[in-house]
Amino acid sequence: MSNEQTTRDNRERFTYKDDDIIEKPFNWSQLSRLFNYMKPYKKQLLPVIIVMMILGTATRLAIPAIIILAIDEAIEPKTGDASLSKLYMYAGLMLLLYVIQWAANTYRIKFTNVIGQRVIYDLRQDLFRHIQKLSFRFFDKRPAGSVLVRVTNDVNALQDLFTNGVVNLLMDCVQLVGIVIILLVWNFKLGAAVMITVPLMFIVSSALRKRIRFAWQDVRMKQSRINAHLNESIQGMKVTQAYAQEKANFTFFKHINGVNIQAWNRASALNQAFGPIIEVTSAIGTLILFWYGSRLIEQDAITVGVLVGFANYIGNFWDPINRLGQMYAQLLIAMASSERIFEFIDEKPTVAELPNANKLASIRGDVTFDRLVFEYEKGRPALRGISLDVKAGQTIALVGHTGSGKSTIMNLLCRFYDPNEGAILIDGTDIRNVSIESLRSQVGIVLQDTFIFSGSIRENIRFGRLDATNDEIVKAATAVDAHDFIMSLPDGYDTEVEERGNSLSMGQRQLLSFARALLADPRVLILDEATASIDTETELKIQEALKKLLAGRTSFIVAHRLSTIRNADRIVVLDHGVIVEQGTHEELMRHGGTYNGLIEAQYRFLSA
Ligand SMILES: Nc1ncnc2c1ncn2[C@@H]1O[C@H](COP(=O)(O)OP(=O)(O)OP(=O)(O)O)[C@@H](O)[C@H]1O
């Protein structure tokens, strides 16, 4: 163990892997991929926005030209006579241009907001749809909080870019090019002189860009850690409080919160550095303008109007450059976020469907495990060659020490993971050759940790089959003996339960999950029996419910209760990923092997 590890302090009790360090160069194809999200709205809204953009930019470019004309033709014309009427005319014209500019900008912002919101909506939908398709392996590696942050923070980070960012960027670019052309055409020498500092500014600022990009990526990563920890803390709050570990937990939170602020400050300081660079270059540019401009006036090469107009254009010239600098930072933030979003969207489900996968036809329920080998992590096999033949309608109890591979077999049967070697056949068909939906709709699973969603009891049962009628729901609940307890709740089937079903007891949650499974009516049922001890009356109820649930289907039970085990047609005993014994309860007891040991240990425990 390294020195660093041994001296690890309390703050690092919990470790979160740095979530996806992405260090790729600025990715133009990704930017265009992002902009593809705007395509559906191209016809509908883009023409309006483009017209507004042209109007806004054209008026902005025209105003200094009017100032030049007003000075040179109305205030100080070469003929010598100032003309008040001309001045009024130019002032009126300017007023009109300002009004047009204001109206164009207002409408443009309104429309871009609409597009921005729709794009964000679509992107979030895509991301969520894809996350739902990802396999268990993906979620094994990632804390829920870090997944959450991509759908919330990272998508939000793109909001500014899509609402006004892109359009502002285009407008600023057009404005810049427009000003450069106007200045060079109006007076090439003076125009070139004032812009001499621009390349210098680009050289200095380009050095900053890379650092800014990485700094913002770092911020996102740190935020992701906060979310991961927060999510875990909230879910594990009861344990934290039960062990009075709030202080230690808070210290760790303070640590990651502080690290996040530091990262943010660093990124923001780098961002701020753009401002002074531009201010200094703009000041030098203005200095050159007045110094060189006044010499040109002395030589009669330009008029006062041109100098004032140039000053105006130059003012308008640095503004967009400054904004482009900020916009670049915003673009970098958006790029960092979009990289993280696309990284998820591009993640291929490890359990993939064959392109030509057929639906699994209605099954009888024969299940064959053929020499299954599986490892979650390389080099640590959880299953080392499992072979088992199960006839339709049989109940198989899987028993064995903790970590022996019982749940893993079930995970493979549902295709939450695919085996490294071997195959699982249902009615002779390899489950990898059929569509996942058709498989899972016929293979039901009731997990040990029954998940109850926030919503009504009725909706929770209906989760088994969304088109079930209310009568069918009541029938399923009655069959598993859950009806009485449901009716004793304040609003019966309409009683709202909290997320995870915290307001229900363990036994009640289990009965609900049985009702849900019964409603789904799968031909093959997997049941990871809850280990928590419950009172004898509930135990009896659950056993009765189980009988009804299992009747007529092929069932696999990761069994912990003796009563469940005894009722099984066959008991399969696992040890370190291999089947060491199988048979009925009596056969295995007579055999006096691992099973016998397990049962005796349970008795010793109960009678102790
Ligand atoms: N998601 C996972 N990632 C990595 N290893 C895992 C994962 N799930 C299980 N394992 C490992 O695989 C082995 C088999 O685990 P499995 O959950 O199948 O055991 P089990 O017999 O169901 O245990 P229990 O009775 O405690 O539920 C164990 O060594 C476990 O540490």
Image: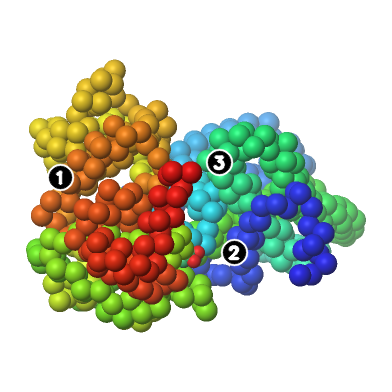
1 vs 2, front mark: 1
Q: Are marks 3 and 2 in contact (CB under 8 Å)?
A: no
Q: Which residue is mark 1?
A: 548
Asked if the residue at label 3 sits under 8 Å from ligand 1, the reply is: no
Label 3, residues with CA under 10 Å away: few <14, some 14-19, many ≥20: few
Q: Name which residue lies at 24% across and 26% down.
A: 486
Q: Secondary structure at mark 1?
A: helix
The front one of 299 and 55 is: 55
Q: Position of residue 274 (x, y in %)?
A: 77, 55
- Res. 87 image quadrant: top right
Q: Which mark is residue 534?
A: none
- Amino acid identity at mark 3: Gly
Q: Are marks 3 and 1 in contact (CB under 8 Å)?
A: no
Distance (Cα) linking label 3 and label 2: 24 Å
Q: Which residue is mark 2?
A: 20
Left or right, residue 313 beside residue 473 = right
Colouring rule applied to residues = rainbow
3 vs 2, front mark: 3
Q: Secondary structure at mark 3?
A: loop
Left or right, residue 47 beside residue 365 = right
Asked if the residue at label 1 sits under 8 Å from ligand 1, the reply is: no
Mark 3 or mark 1: name the one nearer the start of the chain. Answer: 3
Mark 1 or mark 2: name the one nearer the start of the chain. Answer: 2
Q: Secondary structure at mark 2?
A: loop
Distance (Cα) linking label 1 and label 2: 47 Å
Q: Which mark is residue 236?
A: 3
